[in-house]
Image (cartoon, grey):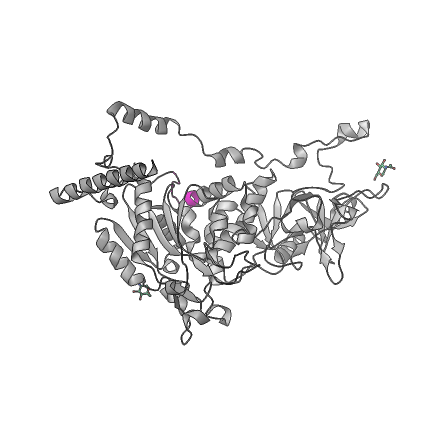
Amino acid sequence: MSQWATRCVVLLSALALATQVFHLLRGDFVHPSRRHSEQPVAPQDPPLPEAVRNKVIGLVVSQKQPSLANNLLQLSTNTHFNARSVRISRDPAAAKTDSVNSRRFSHFRCVGDDNNPEGRRERICVFENVCYDTTNSQWTYHVRGNSSRKPVLFDATNGERLEFYESRQDYQVGFVALSGFTEGSTDWWPTISTSPSPAVQSPESTVVLDSLHALFHLAVHDDNLGHLLWEEMAALWYGMIRLNAFSDELVPMHMLGSLPDRKLNVKFRTAFMPAITPKDPVSFNDYMKKTVAKQRAATHVCFDQLMAGGNMLRFFQSHGWHNQGHEPLFYSLRNRILKHHGIDPEVVPKTHRIVFTNKTETLKKNIDGGLAKNRGIANLRELVQHVQTKYPDVDVQVVEWQKLSIKKQLDLMHSTTIFITPSGGVSTLLPFLPEGGHAIILDYFERKGEAYYGTQAGTSVSMEAPMWNHFPFIKKLYYQVWGSQDFVSDIPGKSVEDVDWRYEASVKVDFERMDKLIEAAFEDMEP
Ligand SMILES: *[C@@H]1O[C@H](CO)[C@@H](O)[C@H](O)[C@H]1NC(C)=O
Ligand SMILES: *[C@@H]1O[C@H](CO)[C@@H](O)[C@H](O)[C@H]1NC(C)=O
């Protein structure tokens, strides 16, 4: 029985091959790669009847709807939570005169684990009516002095917690973390004060800021675009939406040091922050000084709404779960960024373009005086020539991204159909490919396993896959690697066996294996 099936399959395959050879000999064989999207269906496919074809195309056009991003944002634009949530005074007389926010006492609401102090790594909150005392640099959360203390967290092991911090042996655990990178040292919390807010106690020495403000921190010192954009800056975007606190007046306040003045950090901030908020990010200490200077003798700044937390690692294998359900947030921000740069996110190219990343120069660069890193394509020149020869009708470009303005980078990316790139920061522009575009990303091989990155020994690691898994509008193809034969050492004088394959080796691409991925991409983009 199975023998018959096998023979049948072999016979059919032989027939298909014979048909192709026949076309080849006749000279009307068209390589799949040359067939652009606007061209008719492939010769070997039965053509769709005219009526059906029109119907299919018509359906796509008529289904065009406002993007999910717009729908999401309509939930709560600029409306303070206190103005749309339950606020009822227990004193009926006061209820008649009270505004929705009396500013007397603080409130908070969060997303994250309410039952574990360690939830601070992921927790993100909006605090209402919290204040900053500029004379002693203290944050205060105001509660009634004449009532018992209320729980802020329900620790499943140790019971109710009445403070926003917890003392451990030699450090304090806060309520939220301002960075996903460090343990402990970027934690933030307000101290509970059993008195009404200075906004009502001492208004003459208090400035009240009524628009949404956020605390954030940029921790990546090499300004790796992946971490800087999709984790750190974008945390503000995700946070506003996840907390139904969306505002187009968000003021991001950088804490734990001034805003970095590194050239690359400024370049990325200038290009991407305006898609998140029209307000320029500020250095917290400077901003507080300027704010109190506006009012004579002011010492306190109170915030109607202060967002903090939610800056989480998203790229490491051990943190992929952070991205579950965040797909609309990634998609909406990607669209906002393209629109900010004058690019219509819904436009797709009509002809193919293959773009290679060239990382040659970064090999020479020493980051923070440390080891030279490349993680490139060792035989880039040969690979590019091979692809150009194989697909002479396709526009093939080799790009050194750092030499282009962000606008140029986005224009190029959004008109590329196949993006071939090493993994790492340089690959993290791939969300700006057109919808349905393909990225071919080079893996590295994990020899021993790393708990920090969550990688297993003996695996071909797709470095950013835990994040890209949640970008369903781009197709990802991974070029897998299986051992020393796939690598070249980037460290002069060191053999490939003696270097770190995540950081100190480039991939020597096998053309046959790469061809298969390029063919897969072309085929998937066929109409
Ligand atoms: C607590 O003090 C507030 C004024 O700060 C007052 O309105 C309220 O009635 C007091 N509550 C109790 C239980 O005494
Ligand atoms: C990559 O960039 C380097 C440095 O600018 C250049 O010398 C090299 O020719 C480029 N490689 C390709 C294949 O374009």
Question: Residue 147 at x, y = what percent?
Answer: 85, 41
Say which quadrant the N terminus sits in: top left
Question: Residue 441 at x, y = what percent?
Answer: 40, 53
Q: Which residues are magenta?
A: 338-346
Question: Residue 135 at x, y = what percent?
Answer: 73, 58
Against 162, residue 95 (above or below) is above
Q: Quadrant of ligand 1?
A: top right
Magenta highlight on residue 341 = yes
User: Is there any visible trace of residue 370 in the rendered image?
Assistant: yes
Specify the quadrant of the image occupied by residue 435. top left
| Residue at image point 65% right, 36% down | 81
Q: What's the magenta bit mostly, secondary-structure-wise?
A: loop
| Total residue callouts | 0
Against 244, residue 443 (above or below) is below
Q: Nearer the viewer, residue 524 or 78?
A: 524
Question: Residue 103 at x, y = what percent?
Answer: 73, 40
Against 75, residue 428 (above or below) is below
Taking the image as shown, residue 327 lies to the left or right of residue 410, namely right
Say which quadrant the C terminus sits in: top left
Magenta highlight on residue 468 = no
